[in-house]
Image: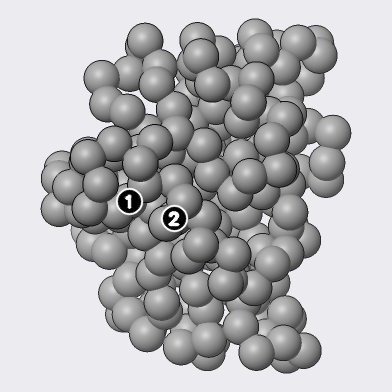
Amino acid sequence: MSSEQLSPSPREQLAHQLAQTVATALREDLSSQDRALLIVSGGSTPVPFFEALSRETLPWDRVDVTLADERWVAAEADDSNARLVRKHLLINRAEAATFVPLTTEHDTPEEGTDEVAQRLKGLSWPASVVILGMGGDGHTASLFPDSRELDLALSTDAHVVAVRTPSQPQARITLSAERLHHARRHYLHLTGDDKRAVLGSAMAGDNVRELPIRAFLSCPLAVYWAP
């Protein structure tokens, strides 16, 4: 096998760099507090990052992990973000972390928001780290441009908001923008030229309803991008 075949891809390198950065941040906070909170996003982009982070050495038994948003589906459904986290992050050393899901046994997210909010209230705020992703439409978490609940999610001080979005097949639940802002560090994890172009457009304007990622461009936001 050639050395070129052994070399990690730019996306793999990015995943390892982000994992090391996040692990360092968690260790730093855990040196002065009992527990630390890590908020992650779903989708395919973070999988290599999850797997790299799961191998980092730190007191994982003192780390709580939750999601920026979730589809209102069964925990073992193929498109469940919780399933993704359990399969790719809560393994290896990170198996000792405590996962806090965003779904309940209720039929709808509207019915489950109070229970989920109570779970989240007991965590170590401000969060140590929030990892955001971004879709091609400029959404982050479940803050979608066409969501009827976007204004609410951007303005409320509630922990979570139930979301119905015409462009998405499932109902969702999302942490509010206020709750996502309530963190010491924010990282935006992106791959591909198309996402870079969308981010460039977001940085060139200020209409948050058009590109909701703009809600986080005013706070310190470290961008991790690879082709």
Q: Can you see residue 9? A: no
Image position, residue 196 (x, y; %): 61, 23
Q: Which residue does the image show at 69% across and 67% down from the upper left? A: 125
The residue closer to the viewer here, 103 or 84, is 103
Tell me if residue 20 comes above or below residue 58 in the rendering.
Answer: above
Q: Nearer the viewer, residue 46 or 120?
A: 120
Residue 45 position, x and y percent, is: 41, 41
Chain-order first, disc 2 or disc 1: 1
The picture places residue 170, in percent across and down from the top left corner, at 27, 26
Q: Nearer the viewer, residue 11 or 3?
A: 11
| Secondary structure category for the residue under label 2 | helix
Q: Is residue 154 left or right of residue 54?
A: right
Cα distance, mark 2 to mark 1? Answer: 7 Å
Q: Amino acid at mark 1?
A: Thr
Classed neighbour count for the residue bearing mark 2: other residues with Cα under 10 Å, few (<14), some (14–19), many (≥20): many
Which residue, given by chain and number where applicable, does mark 2 sit on? Answer: 116
Please name the amino acid that badge 2 sits on. Answer: Val
In-image side of 189 versus 125 (left or right):
left
The residue that appears at 33% across and 80% down in the rendered structure is 95
Q: Do tag 2 and tag 1 residues touch (Cβ < 8 Å)?
A: yes
Is 80 rendered above or below residue 124?
above
Q: Is residue 117 visible?
A: yes
The residue tagged 1 is: 103
